[in-house]
Amino acid sequence: MKIKYNYHTHTKRCGHAIGNDEDYVINAIKAGYKILGFSDHAPYIIPKKGERMNYEQYDEYISSIKELKEKYKDDIEILIGVELEYYPSQMEDLLRYRKELDYCILGQHEQEINGRSNYNLSKPYELLEYADSIEKACDMGLADIVAHPDIFMFSYPKWDKYCTQATETIIDACKRNNIPFELNCGGIKYGKLIYKDGDRYAYPNKKVFEIVANKKCPVILGHDTHDPSHFLNEYWVNTTLEIVKDYDLNIIESYNIKEEANKRKEKLFNK
Ligand SMILES: [Zn+2]
Ligand SMILES: [Zn+2]
């Protein structure tokens, strides 16, 4: 199966991606993609240098992608979104992005605990709060994809019953709201890391995808591209698929993300 879409694409505005916007488009076309969604890290009040774009870059981001959308309209469909986190204290921004953009993906890299941002989830209560945030964002209608939900295994030391509980909470929220669970190719770039339970890639996580397969949750492939050349190199996708090859995953071949986003927006804003 050759996937013809990618909804998880960054730009250099976030501070840790490279290349020009147009190179992402040109390479996606060369790689045979029919839909390219940009989803750079959205700006927030909580500052994080090198992790997300600034407020001042937001309008220019939109206008740059709109220009490319028009320029390449005969070759590829381009959509404009952001990757956001569920931060209760940033709700005004979250709702604005939700309203203005074609779609939003939820990449909960950090967890707001007692009003403070926490990057390294290592304790059970932090992990359960993380799952709870994702659940809230999904139920509220903020997310059209749950990006790399298994990123918690980047910092969580060892699989335990709380990992199972958190994973089940996230999967159930995805299924209830018809939101695909992302199989993310971005974890490969860190290489294999050493953990208490052995060497492994930070994500995708096998145990997580075993539960995803058992619960028959819809899965979407996401490149999480931070470098235009990745579209032309099958290593990222192939290595990701290799990790989960033992599971019978329901990887969707197409997803009308804009239409689904519009339905969710309708529910969120016109209650
Ligand atoms: Zn990133
Ligand atoms: Zn991302």
Image: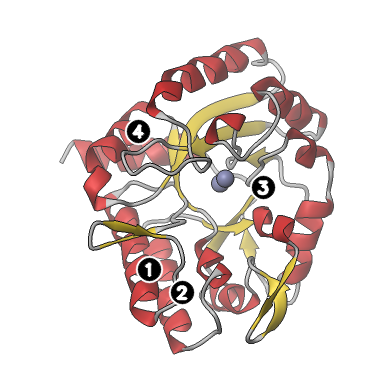
Q: Which residue is mark 4?
A: 97
Label 1 lies in ligand 2 vicinity (Cβ under 8 Å): no
| Disc 3/disc 4 C-alpha distance (Å) | 22 Å
How far separated are the C-alphas under marks 4 and 1?
22 Å
Against 79, residue 253 (above or below) is: below
Which numbered tag is attached to residue 223? 3
The Cα atoms of the two marked residues, 4 and 2, are separated by 27 Å
Element marked by disc 3: loop
For disc 2, the marked residue is 167
| Crowd tier of the residue under label 1, counting other residues whose Cα lies within 10 Å: few below 14, some 14–19, many 20 or above | many
Quadrant field for ligand 1:
top right
What's the colour scheme? secondary structure
The x, y position of residue 81, in whole percent, is 47, 33
Residue 184: name its quadrant. Answer: bottom right
Neighbor class of circle 3 (other Cα within 10 Å; few <14, some 14-19, many 20+) is many
Left or right: residue 247 compared with residue 164: right
In the image, residue 124 lies at what x, y percent? 38, 81
